[in-house]
Image: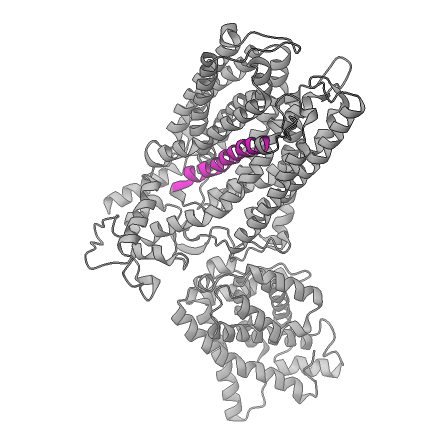
Amino acid sequence: MEKMEEKDNHVHATTKKGGLLTMPFIFANEVCEKLAVVGFNANMVSYLTTQMHMPLTKAANTVTNFNGTASLTPLLGAFIADAYAGRFWVITIASIIYTIGMISLTVSAVLPQLRPPPCDHNQVCEEADGGQLAILYTSLLLGALGSGGIRPCVVAFGADQFDESDPKQNTKTWSYFNWYYFVMGASMLVAVTVLVYIQDNIGWGWGLGIPTIAMFLSVVTFMVGYPLYRNLDPAGSPFTRLIQVFVAAYKKRKLPMVSDPILLYQNDELDAPISISGKLLHTKHMKFLDKAAIVGAEDDIKSPNLWRINTVHRVEELKSVIRMGPIWASGILLITAYAQQSTFSLSQAKTMNRHLTKSFEIPAGSMTVFTMVPMLLTIAFYDRIFIPLARKVTGLDRGITFLHRMGIGFVISILATFVAGFVETKRKRAALAHGLVNHPHSIIPISVFWLVPQYGLHGIAEAFMSIGHLEFFYDQAPESMRSTAAALFWTAISLGNYISTLLVSMVHKFSAGANGSNWLPDNNLNQGKLENFYWLITVLQVANLIYYLWCAKIYTFKPIQVKGKQGTDTEGNASGACQSGLEVLVKAFYHQRYWACNNFAFIRPVIIGKSRTAIDDMAERSKDAATSSTPLSGIVEAFEELIKILNSREASGSQEGLRLDTFCEACSLVSILFSCLGLAFKFAEMEYVSKVNDLSEASKTCDTLENILDLDVANDTVKTAGSHSRNLRRVRQGLDLIRALFEQFLSTDDYSLKVAASTAYAQVCAPYHTWAVRTAVAAGMYALPSRDQLLMNLKETHQSAEKKMKSYIRASLPVIQYIDNLYLSRNVVLDW
């Protein structure tokens, strides 16, 4: 216990550090790394073709291979950071390695003997020899290794500076991802303008020397900030834990599954170092892995052998990583499309008119500025304008979910490569019209600004997709694997570049004609068919989008029990919403954050024109019931009390009606159930809560349900929009909808609740809703939580939920019938 207290005190002490004060030191390191890598990478094709005299396709593949390797090494850096050294020391050492690689590359650019001799366009150029290429590749390898330590750790290290258990800092975490990408983009903008201009017009020595000096200064700056950082200790090798779960599950493969997940092994003390922000809760998926947490007769639960038995938290870590796989894979092809900007798009730009004035010409490598500027503007717009507006509609701190954000990026990327094909067609027509098809080094009289749309669209797509991808990995990965999660982001970039290499090689091979024609010729782009290559990528991206939508639809967010500021536990999922999968199939901005699902306490829907005080009162009544037991228990108890009142009145022959305030108090509790059902029941929820709120206000002047109905009958306003009697009818439908849903829940085995919810909606509400509402609800049915998620949100097991749902059905039917009889007794037909 003393050790645990010491650990808790250590964690508490470290959380006092960090915050916004550390950002300049962290961002300085990232800025210099990007100046170095982008300053060279943006113009790398030019360096390889003009200085090292490589053929175009070989140079393009060298660029993508370097980018692929530099994006693959983050797996190694992340592993060392998470398992042994911690993020600070990995970033520091990797930055030093990177600096050494930059020094080597600068020296090779300065010394003539390390490059082949220069030649004119009309001469046969001598290609770099083996020794010269060895120095080049060694320098690039050191740069790739340095990137492997910086890239996965710096983003996670920056996010570590904000305490997720502090509500004031939690929202800053998501803003951090936007500003991390903004700062990164700004440094890249400087690289593709200032540094590329220096490389083209002053020399490669200065063009590489400046970022080398900057990289050295960044190491010093980053280390100076050490006393301010919030450093989280490494929690052991995450890969070892994942393998242990696999092995334990395999060893126990023949054991029967336990009857209730609560019987699976839990050990909070064992999991404490890897669950500081919260413990992962059990999910129903991948049941085979659950066998790793079955306690056998030979297991010592006090000193467990982790190769035989693992906790639910560790099993769920593996499940989280597996669930992330399909979404991770969907990002690969977008990088393949994006990679063409530094290869073939740059080659296009070199053949086009780049003059702004007679004396100033835009360097071809600087065309990336038209990607960076739209990306930066999109990020600024997204963070400062879009998120605050979307937050008001959705209730999500980040505006829309990262899955929505990624989906938007995929669509824009498809448009970018589609447009690029038409621009290339126009460029070749201009070359043909001016007789320049056979002159690969001549400038075609067509403005380079025709390339701006494809560059700009790629920038906007990256602002949506790449940041959303990064958010997804950080949010959904187990907390002890966040460096590894960031490495997965870079691994997707790596594979995207490698696939680009493979695709270019295959197209170059299989499109070769007997007459020497080729889609991607080595020496003359004017004679190729680059537009076909762009459209091939477009088709692949369309297929990838369909795959992504399917993956997002079935994706289940990780459920986590979060430690609050006072040490209390609340349950929720990592997306901050009661949902299972993506609601991309409907409007992205309809996504709602339902606080009731996470805390079983608060439901604060936005209702136009209604009293906020009245809604808060309703939330407090919900909170009282929810915190005393479970939401279902509170609802059942309230309706059973209504039955007692009705039975007592009937037994005594009393003519007194049912009190309106008592009725509203019971009905207000049901709002929690609508919230946990998500987008599909959003319309029903908004209508239900607003009607209960109206009746609650009416109870100040009307004592009973009979009073409001008699008043509207007298005024002939029973069916008038906004009347209390009409609102009572809608509340009655809400109660009946939940009753019907519970009946379907108990009678069907639909895992996603789609059949149960659709049937209940069709029975109760669909006849009274417009076509537009019915269509939106039907689309929203794809966003329903699973049965297990719903039960988890309600804090129920299958057995307890079945009992309480049956109790609600029994208790709500007499109340529903009582309301119907009120209308029928006053000759009001129930057809509206």
**Residue at x 74% of width, y 83% of height:** 714
Q: Is residue 215 on the magenta stretch?
A: no
Q: On the rendered structure, is 623 left or right of 766?
A: left
Tell me if residue 523 comes above or below residue 332 in the rendering: above
What is the x, y in percent for residue 294? 28, 58
User: Which image quarter: residue 594?
Assistant: bottom right
Question: Is there any visible trace of residue 384 in the rendered image?
Answer: no
Q: On the rendered structure, is 439 left or right of 303?
A: right
Tell me if residue 611 comes above or below residue 66 in the rendering: below
> How many badges with numbers are in the image?
0
What segment is highlighted magenta in the picture? Answer: 481-508
What is the x, y in percent for residue 640? 47, 79
**Residue at x 48% of width, y 84% of height:** 644
User: Which image quarter: residue 48?
Assistant: top right
Question: Is there any visible trace of residue 824 in the rendered image?
Answer: yes
Q: Residue furthest front?
A: 514
Foreground residue among 364 and 679? 364
Foreground residue among 621 and 308? 308
Tell me if residue 442 comes above or below residue 815 in the rendering: above
What predominant SS class does the magenta segment belong to? helix
Q: Is residue 482 on the magenta stretch?
A: yes
Colour setting:
one colour
Foreground residue among 419 and 587? 419
**Residue at x 66% of width, y 84% of height:** 823
Q: Quadrant of the C terminus?
A: bottom right
Q: On the rendered structure, is 832 left or right of 54?
A: right
Q: On the rendered structure, is 310 left or right of 732?
A: left
What is the x, y in percent for residue 678? 55, 61
User: Which image quarter: residue 770?
Assistant: bottom right
What is the x, y in percent for residue 749? 47, 70
